[in-house]
Image (spheres, rainbow, N blue to C red):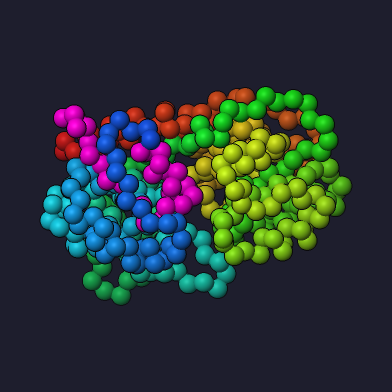
Amino acid sequence: MPHDMVDLLLIEPYFGGSHRQFAEGIRRHSRHHVRLATLPGRYWRWRMRGSAPLFEERLRKSPAPGVILASSMFPLAEFLGLAPPRFREAKTILYFHENQLTYPLPEGERRDLHAVMTQINGALAADRILFNSRHHRREMLGALPGFLRALPDHKPPGVAGRFRRSRVLPLGVDFESLGPPPRRRERKGEPILLWNHRWEHDKGREEFALLIRRLRRRKVPFGLVVTGASPGTRSDLFEELPRIAGDRLRHVGFAPSRRDYARLLAGADLAVSTARHEFFGVSVLEAIHMGAFPLLPERLAYPEILDPGRHPECYYRSREELFDRAEELLTGPRPPVERYRRAAARFAWPHRIGAFDRLFEEILGS
C-alpha cells in the first residue's frame, strides 16, 4: 500500500438503503484502501444492541486499520472495549446518518433511551463526529440539554461540548447507477405524481394521503407512482394506497432493481415530499436528477440541498400552499428541470469524495 494511502475500515451494521449507498460510495470512490464490515439492513434495534460482539469476533484476526469509520447505528464504544488492543489504536469517526434522540416516534411509542445512550457513548469514544447535514447537527445539539437534564443523576460529563466539536460532511449520492437523465419530451397523457419515500409516519404519509384525496376531489388529472418501501417490510401501504388513490395508482411498492427504480423516476413529472423528518434527502436528489420537479416543505434539511432563495418555486410553507402548488404543477406548465439538476449534481460522489478523503488523511496524521 502506498505510504500516503489510508487503510480504512468502514463498519455498517445496518447495510441497507442510504446507509448501504453511503458505504458503497465511499468504497467505490475513495482513493484510499477501504474495507467494509457489514450486517444486513434489518432489525435495527438488535443491530444497535448486539452487533459489537459480532464484529469483534469477525474482525479478531483482521489487521488493524488506520481509521475506523462507523455509522451511528453501530455501538462503537462497546466494540472498542471488546476488540483487541490494536483496534483501539485506530483513529475513529462516527457518522450520524440519523439519531435516536430526535427521530419522530409513532403515536404511543416511547423513546428508547438506551439506544440514545448507545449513540452518545459512541460519540464520546470517537475521535471525530460527523453529521450529514446542518439541520441534523442543529437538531441534535438542541435536544441534548433536555435529555441530559432528564437523567436521574451522575450525568455523563462533556457530552454537549463533544457534540459541539462535531462537523457537517454531506454524503454523496449514487447518480451513476440511475443512468443518464432522460431527454424530456412533451408528455402525452396525464402527468405522473411521484412519492419515493418510505411509507412511514415520519415521512408524512397522512399529509400525502390528504393531498391525493384533495387532487381527486378537484378532478386534477394525474397518475400516482409510490416506491420506496423496503423489500419484505410489512406495511399497510398496499391496503391504503388503492383505497386512497383508486384508479390513479400506476405503481406501488419496492422497485426490484436500481434500473427499475430509475425507470419509475424517469417517468415522473412531480416529486412531492410531506416529510416530518428528513436529515438529508437522497430520494429527492435522485428524483431531481431523473427529471422530476421537486415540491418540498421549506424546512428540515431540504434548504441545504436546494437553496430556497434561488429556487423558491420548489417550496411550500403550509398545507394549503402544498395543495394549491401541486394542482398548479399538475395542470399547468412546470419550470425546466435542468437548473435543479445542476444544483443536485454537486452531491454526486465524484464531487463529494474529496472532502472525505482529506478528512481521513487529516485524522490519521493528527
Residue shown at the point (43%, 62%) measured from the top left: 44
Q: Tell me where the magenta segment starts and ends, as one range.
A: 1-27
Q: Is residue 233 above or below residue 278?
A: below
In percent of width and height, residue 4 lies at 19, 29
Q: Is residue 15 magenta?
A: yes
Residue shown at the point (82%, 31%) measured from the top left: 188
Q: Is residue 189 above or below residue 183?
A: below
Is residue 138 rendered to the left or right of residue 154?
right
Task: Name the quadrant containing residue 66.
Answer: top left
Q: Is residue 333 visible?
A: yes
In percent of width and height, residue 37 lies at 32, 51
Looking at the rendered structure, the number of numbered marks drawn on it comes to: 0
Residue 249 or 121: which is nearer the viewer?
A: 249
Q: Is residue 43 magenta?
A: no
Q: Is residue 355 visible?
A: no
Say which quadrant the C terminus sits in.
top left
Name, please, the residue furthest toward the bottom.
152
In percent of width and height, residue 154 lies at 23, 71
Is residue 136 rendered to the left or right of residue 206?
left
Say which quadrant the N terminus sits in.
top left
Residue 156 or 2: which is nearer the viewer?
A: 2
Residue 258 or 80: which is nearer the viewer?
A: 258
Residue shown at the point (70%, 26%) measured from the top left: 184
In percent of width and height, residue 86 lies at 13, 52
